[in-house]
Amino acid sequence: MACALPEDDGGRDVFPVAIRKVVVRSEDDGHLVFLQQVGGDVVFPIAVGLLEAAAIAHFLDGVIAARPVTHELLVSAIRALGGTVEAAVIEALLGGVFYAKLIIAAPDGTRRTLDCRPSDGICTALEAGAPIFATRELLASVSSAAP
């Protein structure tokens, strides 16, 4: 089920994705978040840092940090300024690197789009209770890359 980004955010079709699995390894590399198109067959991994993988896994497990971590601080700051996190959008895979953005609604109703790492976008969206989307182009790209 596609929906469109607002025209001021490119008007592109986006599809909701959900976290299927988080892999946190004991080594320094290889931490992965697997996203799946909601209602679809496309599943793709995104490599993330240890802290982000652990934060996502903890959020999914309902673990609450003793002190606010970075994405909690970001959501608190956005809310304190009267804004809301509307969505995280994983938009492209270029040269093996995923690109994402956060869509923030300002108090006056305008939207701001912030470039971010996918892991930060996912963490922030989870904390804010906002949806996570992938663009049609990204889903086509990752599904054609599958063996």
Image: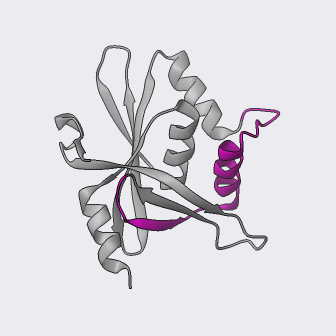
Identify which residue, 40 or 119, lies in the foreground. 40
Question: Percent x, y for residue 78?
Answer: 51, 25
Which residue: 76% across, 74% down?
A: 27
Question: Percent x, y for residue 133?
Answer: 37, 48
Residue farthest to the bottom, as pictured = 147
Q: Would you say 85 lies left or right of 27 here?
A: left
Question: Percent x, y for residue 62?
Answer: 72, 39
Residue 88 seen: yes
Residue 117 seen: no
Query: Which residues are drawn in magenta?
Result: 39-68
Which residue: 25% across, 57% down?
A: 136
Q: Is residue 57 magenta?
A: yes
The image quadrant that residue 90 belongs to is bottom left
Which residue: 50% across, 17% down?
A: 81
The image quadrant that residue 113 belongs to is top left
Q: Would you say 138 lies left or right of 56 here?
A: left
